[in-house]
Amino acid sequence: MIDNKFLRYSILLFTLFYSNIVKSNSDIYFVDMKFLMNNSLAGKSIIKKLDEKNISTQKKFKEIEKNLRDEENSIVSQKNILSKDEYVKIVKKFTEKIEKYKLSRNNTINDISKMKNNAQQILVDYLTPILTEYAEKNSISYIIPKENIIIGKTELDLTNIIIEVLNSKIKTIDIK
């Protein structure tokens, strides 16, 4: 008797879950978020502005590093001329200057990383209503990131459609 109840419940549960799985397969689509981030007009504007920022900061850092190397060479050349106490003081000041530079460089790199993350979040914020509207108009239950797909039919990929809509709605994103 217990086996009969178990069998009935098992069949009932299997039927319910199986019918939901079969039904849901027809309205699951995917979008390549990396492609949208890198190839939409707004995504390209983010990349371009970040590249410009990186190039300018790299130039600044290289100039500072060159000046620090020159100063280091100058200090080393004065080692035999200066008294030991004076030399130690100069080396200590120079070490502090290097630490300030490293801190400044790390802060700048972190700031650029934050700018990138903020700009990408803004792009996602624009993208979410576009995906929601498209899903509602086309009776789509799920749109998932392509990165989570192992195998999928190409006709279920909405990336090209969504990028066209995204490009028509937003061209650039300001980086702050």
Image: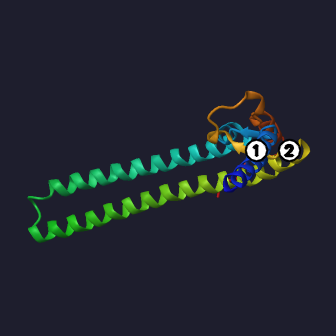
Q: Nearer the viewer, residue 114 or 85?
A: 114
10 Å crowding of disc 2: few (<14), some (14-19), many (20+): some
Instruction: Check the image and name the residue furthest to the front.
Output: 1
Q: Residue at x 42, y 51 (%)?
A: 61
**Quadrant housing residue 27:** top right
Q: Earlier in the sequence, mark 1 or mark 2?
A: 2
Q: Which mark is residue 143?
A: 1
Please identify the quadrant where the N terminus is shown: bottom right
Left or right: residue 13 versus residue 112 is right
Assign a secondary structure to mark 2. helix
Q: Which mark is residue 134?
A: 2
Compared with residue 149, is residue 131 higher up or lower down, i.e. above or below? below
Q: Which mark is residue 94?
A: none
Residue 57: image location, x then y, percent: 49, 50
**Quadrant housing residue 139:** top right
Left or right: residue 144 versus residue 27 is left
Residue 100: image location, x then y, percent: 36, 64
Q: Residue at x 22, y 67 (%)?
A: 92
Q: Are marks 1 and 2 in contact (CB under 8 Å)?
A: yes
- The amino acid type found where label 1 is placed reads Ile
Q: Nearer the viewer, residue 131 or 18?
A: 18
Left or right: residue 65 versus residue 33 is left
What whole-number distance in Å separates the C-alpha atoms at marks 1 and 2? 10 Å
Residue 112: image location, x then y, percent: 54, 54
Residue 14: image location, x then y, percent: 73, 46
The tally of labels here is 2
Instruction: Check the image and name the residue furthest to the right.
Output: 137
- The amino acid type found where label 2 is placed reads Tyr
Instruction: Check the image and name the residue furthest to the top.
Output: 154
Please identify the quadrant where the C terminus is shown: bottom right
Q: Nearer the viewer, residue 149 or 35?
A: 149
